[in-house]
Amino acid sequence: MNTSALSAMDAVEIKVMIRPDQELRAVRALEVNEDTADVRLVYYFDTSDLDLFKAGVILRARLVKGDVDDSTVKFRPVDAASVSEDWKRLDDFKLEADLIGGQVVCSASLTAPQKRDEIDEVANGKRAIGKLFSSDQERFLSEFHKMPVKFGELRVLGPIRVLRWKLEHETFPYELTAEEWRLPDGDDLVEVSIKAPPDQAEQASKDFEAHLRSLGLDPEGTQQTKTRTALEYFVTQAGA
């Protein structure tokens, strides 16, 4: 594990994508159900060839049941040393690291609130995609992505219905987050994660691995992220 890459992070999120053959086992072991979930609808915006995603750029919007909707510009991977203090001072800016399979990937993101119905209007083609992103987000985008983003050429990829749970297990010291992403064809993507301070990440990863094994789950999971899987699904469907 590259501990030096973690030291500048606000937090480290340790993630495991559950193998497809273990998804039902995971849902049962975690004792989650739809009635207790936080519900979100997630949209991504990219070209038909996923040019932004391939360049490490993620444009996302979320409808959040019972909370404020939002849009996010994220760069992953990013060199933490290249991020100025000006960005770090913004309330909705995050500098985080994902730890997946022992590999550290740093990301920087800037989120902005959205008024009710604005995301729906974009999804329905009644509003331009670029209207979802604030001037700060557009400045953030242009600073870290040197090619201009032509919002008018982007596609709406989604929605993904996301069920999300925060869980506490008596024998495990970290709060667990479980997410179930439901694609329109009925396929599910299940991810389990924890967050830890950078100086605790290495031990937290070992503890997380042991806890997943105790639940009968493979801590290796699958190596492809849920975001990549979902984006590839929607691009394939659009081209079908």
Image: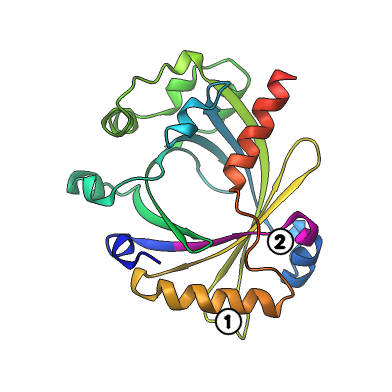
Marker count (numbered): 2
Residue 64 visible somewhere in the drawing: no
The structure residue drawn at horizontal position 77% and vertical position 62%, both measured from the top left corner, is 22
Give the amino acid at mark 1: Phe
Q: Is residue 98 magenta?
A: no
* Residue ID for mark 1: 172
Which residue lies most toward the left here?
Answer: 85
Describe the element under mark 1 as helix, strand or loop: loop
Q: Could you say where residue 165 lies in the image, as x and y percent from the top left? A: 64, 61
Q: Nearer the viewer, residue 21 or 88?
A: 21
Q: How is the image coloured?
A: rainbow
Locate residue 86 relative to residue 104 in the image: left or right.
Answer: left
**Measured along the vertical axis of the image, is residue 165 above or below residue 147?**
below
* Residue ID for mark 2: 36
Q: Nearer the viewer, residue 24 or 223?
A: 223
The structure residue drawn at horizontal position 81% and vertical position 61%, both measured from the top left corner, is 24
Q: Which residues are magenta?
A: 13-23
